[in-house]
Amino acid sequence: GEGLAMVTAGSYDILIMDQVMPVYTGLEVIRILADRGPLPPIIMVTGTGSEQIAVEAMKLGARDYIVKDVEGGYLDLMSTVIEQVLRQQRLMEEKRQALQVLRVRAHQQAILADLGLRALAGKELVALIE
């Protein structure tokens, strides 16, 4: 539906979705988005007693879930869960960047080591010729 079109057209730091929505279920939206590429962090909101849906959402790539309660206490948890998921996302991105830097440096060191060995071999060859 409309929300799916918005996600497709834009870039979001986090998605919060309910399982029960007008056009697609939350699980269907996660599957659709996963088929299109890497998922943004997703928090699934489910009704009381629907832990199976929350578990399935996590298996599909949701980062966390909140079970709705009649009193609305889940809304008090929302900001904490959002902060935790965004913190996890930042840490994952920092780790990804650090690993990329390590890969580049390891490649550079391998090149330098290869050049050093070639230079050493060249000196040995010159010494043998003389």
Image (cartoon, rainbow, N blue to C red):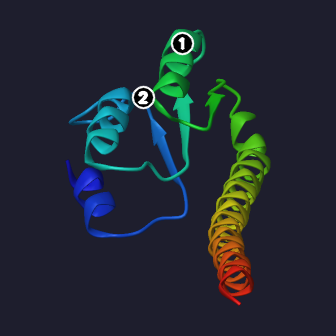
Q: Residue at x 26, y 38 (%)?
A: 32
Residue type pointed to by label 2: Gln
Q: Compared with residue 96, is residue 39 higher up or lower down, i.e. above or below?
A: above
Q: Which residue is mark 2?
A: 19
Q: Position of residue 130 (x, y in %)?
A: 71, 90
Q: Residues within 10 Å of mark 2 (few under 14, many from 20)?
A: some
Residue at the limit of the structure toward the front, as seen here: 130
The image quarter containing residue 10 is bottom left
Q: Are marks 1 and 2 in contact (CB under 8 Å)?
A: yes
Q: Residue at x 56, y 17 (%)?
A: 55
Residue type pointed to by label 1: Ser
Q: Position of residue 19 (x, y in %)?
A: 42, 28
Q: Compared with residue 10, is residue 92 higher up or lower down, i.e. above or below?
A: above
Q: Residue at x 64, y 24 (%)?
A: 70
The image quarter containing residue 20 is top left
| Residue 69 falls left or right of residue 12 | right
